Image (cartoon, rainbow, N blue to C red):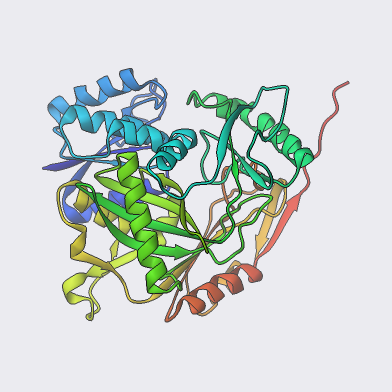
Amino acid sequence: MTRVLLLSNTTGYQVRAFDEAAAALGVELVFATDRCHKLDDPWQDRAIPVRFYDLETSLSAILLQAETRPIDGVIAVGDRSVVLAARAAHELGIPWHSVAGAMASADKRRSRAIMAAAGLPSPRFGMIRASERDIHAGDIGFPCVIKPVGLSGSRGVIRANNPRECAGAIWRIRALLARPQIRAARAGLEDELLVEEFIGGREFALEGLMTEGALSTLAIFDKPDPLDGPFFEETIYVTPSRANEQIQREISASVAEAAWALDLRHGSIHAECRVNEKGVYVLEVAARPIGGLCSRVLTFVPAQDAAKPPKLASLEHLLLEHAVGESPARWIRERRAAAVMMIPIPRRGRLKSIRGEEDARVVPGIVDLRITAKLDQLLEPLPEAGSYLGFIFARGETPEDAERAVREAHDALSIEIDREVALRQA
């Protein structure tokens, strides 16, 4: 039996998709998740209980399990798991990203310094501590962007156009970083802030696989909504990109160079880029695939039979094959355009109802709609938010068709959120 070690949060949306792909491929998944270690297999998945902040203890647990269930490949889902995945792969002798590369990908400060040192186009940047009394943007100037070093998904990322906005942004990020659930992650980066020059231009994302240092670009996504701040909510991804072939080649080449500089040599990568008249700025390269349910926007067909209508393969299918030594060149993205909308949270409050789902589902081109927020759940928009209301997926003959479908479906939804009532203490 071929086995792949899958490291993930217990709440990861992609775990079920990996489980389905593994069953189809005849691969056994060995889960390593941050489930409660005091309960005896609460999810009935035989998962190894790990803590991503306790690398040595977690690594020992994985290696002990591997003595009786040998591991052939490694996949990490989510930013928190990548360093442990790299350590496990190194100890097991399995090709994967280096430990140093995984650490850099999860630390905005390290990755920015490494890419700048490699001569890649990079914004000016500096570091401050959220606890500093003297709040300023250093020598970066304005506009600038303040980012928590250890958070992902645009969480806590704020643009400031002047000293007053900069001070307000840092105070707001400081309050976010002080939250118990963030401190509990114990990433060691809870007080570090990156302040960098704002880079204008169009934003793109690249989904890829590194194989012994060579990049295979699986998809380039347009982000059609302007991302100019003050917050940077990613709402719509559309593929194939409408950028011309030259720009797409430059994006792939720049991401490949950035991944090489970071020592990300074998496994999934997800990169974010800005493109303007000065070139391609690689903002970050994560050592993991596109997050959560968003992976459903990507489907693939065998490269040799691309003109036929065979059963489509998921991104998780490709990642499992790659983890056990298969080449990603066997697959190409299907011909149709695709889009996903991460349904934004309009304001803070408790979710009371979502109406119009039936109307949204019958919009031409819509293939799925998933509401992931729960009724009466306390919701927050960015920059504090750590989740979305849900996801809308569409297919179309052109990128314009797919984008139009998710926007029309979103317009059909009516979202009722009650404002949170603050209770005064006597």
Residue 57, given in percent of the width and then of the height, sits at 32, 18
- 111 vs 209: above or below: above
Image quarter of the N terminus: top left
Query: Residue shown at 19%/62% (left/top)?
Result: 329
| Image side of residue 2 versus residue 157, left or right | left
* Left-right relation of 350 to 213: right
Most foreground residue, 283 or 49: 283
Residue drawn where x is 34% and y is 26% of the image: 49
Q: Nearer the viewer, residue 85 or 27?
A: 85
Q: Quadrant of residue 380?
A: top right
Q: Residue furthest left?
A: 1
Quarter of the figure with residue 128: top right
Q: Position of residue 310 (x, y in %)?
A: 22, 74
- Residue occupying image coordinates x 48% and y 37%: 108
Q: Left of 48 or right of it: where is 281?
A: right
Q: Quadrant of the C terminus?
A: top right
Residue 9 seen in the current view: no
Q: Could you say which is closer to the camera, residue 209 or residue 145?
A: 145
Q: Can I make out residue 62 in this image?
A: yes
Residue 15, x across and y down, in percent: 36, 46
